[in-house]
Image (cartoon, helix red, strand yellow):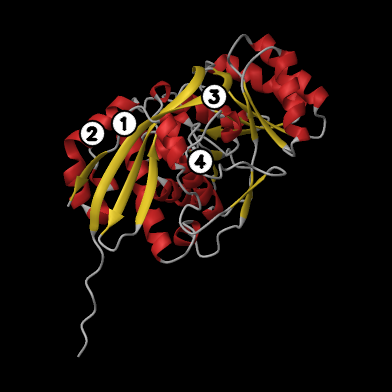
Amino acid sequence: MSVAPPAARLALLRWRPFRLPLRHRFESATGVLVAREGVLVELHDTDGASGIGEASPTASLGGGERVDVLRLLARHAAALLAAGDAAASAVADGPGAAALRCALDTALLDLAARRRDLPVAALLAERPASSVLVNAVIGGGTAEEVAAHARAATAAGYGVLKLKVGTSDLGHDIDTVAAVRAACPGATLRLDANGAWDEHTATQAMRRLALFGVELLEQPVPAAEVEALARLRVSAPLRIAADEAIASEAGADRVLALRAADLLVLKPMLLGGPRPALALAQRAAQRGIGSFATTSFDSSVGTAAALHLAAALPWDAAQGLGTGDHLAADLVVEPLRPAGGRLAVRGPGLGVELDAGALDALATAPWSEVRA
């Protein structure tokens, strides 16, 4: 009688920090971004298969910094490797933890999907989409600058534009949205305040901004003010989306309990990976709340994780995956860039391949590793 070979086990965990410059400064209510720092994570099993993931926390969103991820790996990499398929859930809470969980969850999915010659999305949903609609992301600036970026985005094929608001006074936001609407009369407009307003200002803003045919407004009030978010949603003349408010498990529970939003903004990097984000979307759907996926200005590795999540969601809404347009460099051979306002789902695995030369140029330290 033949005996089946033992299942492959994780044999190697290695990681390398990197820094990606942006093409231009990007302004939002949470600050100005000029570069993106993160850690590339790679898992290998005993059969030689491998998977990659990205841990790029955002300090302004409470996710810690790159150094926090590196500390967690330096202290716990051997235990994480020994945890095998449970590696992502084995990361203890703290700064950088959500981003590291995301990297490990993504790498495990990438490895498993590559072994089966499937895209990651096929592991997340029975019938994933082959492509998803994507919105352009436009940062703050003068009304004229933002309108110019909007015209360029629509010329590139984007039909949905997301504008950052709350970077200045409300009058400036009104002028900016008016300028974009005049420049792009056929575009669908989304706004993101990143929690910049108090409840009174948000009420005024929604009443005035709704006149420009805005589709939805993300996170009008600070993340902790879930009750205010719920009150705003009840009387809002447009749809409300929760973003920073769902970054913690307690916050997400509160948003769902109060039905404080019409939509959830799913960032795998803040939620611990594609699988936890999908689980949250499924919980939200049971309460009649939709979801869409976005990145946190990740490399194409992190963007691929969000893309496969987006392909697994049951709603054909525009996804916030156009942030790669803002990067001046990337880590993969063929960076993920939308065409005609859509992003195709690649495979096998994440559908991206590391560019060793690019990584060498963008890395800030050599590889570190632990072996089983």
Q: Earlier in the sequence, mark 2 or mark 4?
A: 2
Give amino acid for label 1: Gly
Q: CA distance from mark 4 to mark 1?
A: 20 Å
Say the numbered circle drawn on residue 117: none
Whole-percent x and y of residue 96?
31, 31
Q: Residue at x 63, y 46 (%)?
A: 317
Assess whether mark 4 and mark 2 are in contact (beta carbons under 8 angstroms).
no
Q: Which residue is mark 4?
A: 300
* Crowd rating for badge 3 (residues with CA inside 10 Å; few <14, some 14–19, many 20+): some
Q: Tell me if 21 is positioned left or right of 239 in this view.
A: left
Amino acid at the residue labelled 2: Leu
Name the residue at 76% across, 24% down.
211
How far is mark 4 from mark 3, CA to CA?
Answer: 13 Å
Which percent across, then down, holds residue 301? 46, 42
Tell which circle, 2 or 1, labels the residue nearer the N-terminal end: 2
What residue appears at the point 51 percent right and 19 percent down from the top-left corner?
Answer: 34
Per the rendering, the mark at residue 72 is 2
Amino acid carrying label 4: it is: Ser
| Secondary structure of residue under mark 2 | helix
From this view, report whether residue 108 is shown above or below residue 99.
Answer: below
Q: Earlier in the sequence, mark 1 or mark 3?
A: 3
Q: Sequence order check: which comes first, mark 4 or mark 3?
A: 3
Q: Which residue is mark 3?
A: 22
Separation of residues labelled 2 and 3 (CA atoms): 27 Å
Q: CA distance from mark 2 to mark 1?
A: 8 Å
